[in-house]
Image (cartoon, rainbow, N blue to C red):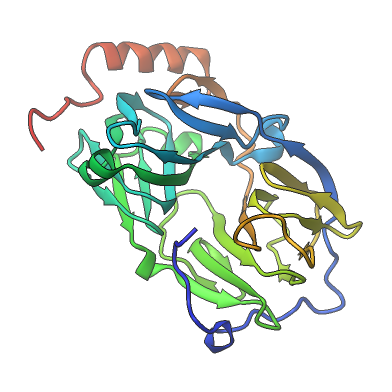
């Protein structure tokens, strides 16, 4: 997992441990993501399987795409399709992907980059492997997160953000044994590059063997940790976890995650996506690529798409 990295973690800003008055969050549950196929045939792990929208709010779902090694001309993608009512956040750790949308946004997403697309009132887009990946094949690995929008912003104008890995805020834990890559939101006074409509925090963390990560966490946010790879324990009661599992924390002021002294993964690290946000607490009606508040709004979204009101596929790029 190349992503953004450094040679010496001890040169990075350190996140202090929570003060003794901060209450560690216990774990509500640890669930395992099932394996499936999405789009034109790329492999995914369904990160939020087994969780309710009330637990993941303001997030709708999380898909881990790969890791998979493609032969030349074998890589898959998601051809043109619509979205309305939420934001898609695609983060790549390996490979390349090309994003295009009917609002003129897009470009190549490379290792460590994030594309943040606010679908809002409606947009068409596609996500396909780059010409280099199609020609040479190679390792592909990434994650797509859907972030809900509140009722007042569901029909906001579409927006596209390209967050290159050089823009990620890099930090380490109190003893320099974990690398924290902040994509959006705030950790210990540091602000991520992503501009969000919904208040959230989103980070990719690499923990080396025997590392302990303690972070203060906004009490009004939920707290979720999806394990891309590695094994360890989490929460005040030290619940065990492994790859392709979602750790759902209960209420509290701080998060505790500890990696095992020996890791069975090839990288010998624990790779975690840590995310949380302020729940929107509104009705959610989800139908395919549309996330709205009522069935009537879903029917309107389908009609608007069918009548071309969400944009037009560009004739050239």
Q: Is residue 304 above or below residue 150?
A: above
| x then y, percent, for residue 252 | 81, 59
Q: Is residue 270 left or right of residue 126?
A: right
Residue 72 lies in what quarter of the image? top left
User: Which residue sits at x=36%, y=42%?
Assistant: 118
Residue 59 visible somewhere in the drawing: yes
For the image, the number of numbered tags is 0
Q: How far across and how far down the image is residue 236, in percent?
A: 88, 60
Residue at (87, 78) in percent of width and height: 20
Q: Quadrant of residue 33?
A: top right
Q: Is residue 149 left or right of residue 263?
A: left
- Residue sitting farthest toward the right: 237
Q: Which quadrant does the C terminus fall into?
A: top left
The reply to whether residue 189 is visible in this rendering is no
- Give me the residue at 33% from left, 54% from top: 110
User: Which residue reaches farthest bottom?
Assistant: 11
Q: Is residue 295 above or below residue 156?
A: above
Note whether 193 is above or below 126 in the view shown: below
Give the residue drawn at x 34%, y 31%.
Answer: 77
Image coordinates of residue 272 in percent, x first then y, are: 63, 56
Instruction: Give coordinates of residue 201: x percent, y percent.
Output: 56, 58
Q: Is residue 108 toward the left or the right of residue 167 in the image? A: left
Q: Nearer the viewer, residue 136 or 302?
A: 136
Q: Is residue 19 left or right of residue 123?
A: right
243 and 239: which is toward the camera: 243
Compared to 287, does 34 lie above or below?
below
């Amino acid at each position: 997992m190349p992503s953004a990295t450094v040679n010496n973690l001890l040169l990075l800003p350190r996140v202090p441990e929570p003060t003794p008055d901060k209450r560690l969050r216990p774990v509500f549950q640890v669930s395992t993501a099932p394996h499936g196929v999405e789009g034109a045939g790329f492999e995914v792990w369904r990160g939020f399987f087994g969780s309710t929208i009330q637990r993941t709010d303001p997030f709708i779902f999380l898909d881990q795409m790969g890791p998979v090694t493609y032969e030349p001309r074998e890589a898959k993608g998601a051809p043109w399709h619509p979205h309305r009512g939420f934001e898609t956040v695609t983060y790549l750790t390996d490979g390349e992907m090309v994003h295009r949308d009917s609002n003129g946004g897009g470009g190549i997403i490379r290792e460590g980059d994030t594309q943040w697309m606010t679908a809002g009132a409606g947009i068409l887009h596609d996500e396909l492997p780059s010409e280099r990946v199609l020609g040479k094949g190679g390792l592909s690995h990434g994650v797509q997160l859907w972030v809900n929008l509140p009722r007042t912003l569901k029909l906001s104008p579409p927006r596209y953000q390209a967050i290159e890995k050089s823009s990620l805020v890099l930090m380490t834990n109190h003893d320099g044994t974990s690398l924290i890559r902040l994509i959006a939101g705030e950790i210990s006074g540091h602000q991520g590059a992503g501009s969000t409509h919904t208040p959230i925090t989103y980070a990719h963390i690499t923990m080396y063997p025997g590392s302990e990560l303690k972070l203060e966490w906004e009490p009004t946010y939920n707290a979720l940790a999806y394990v891309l790879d590695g094994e360890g324990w989490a929460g005040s009661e030290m619940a065990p976890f492994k790859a392709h599992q979602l750790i759902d924390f209960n209420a509290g002021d701080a998060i505790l995650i500890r990696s095992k002294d020996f890791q069975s993964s090839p990288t010998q690290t624990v790779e975690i996506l840590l995310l949380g946000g302020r729940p929107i607490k509104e009705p959610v009606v989800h139908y395919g690529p549309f996330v709205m508040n009522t069935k009537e709004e879903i029917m309107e979204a389908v009609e608007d798409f069918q009548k071309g009101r969400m944009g037009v596929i560009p004739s050239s790029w």
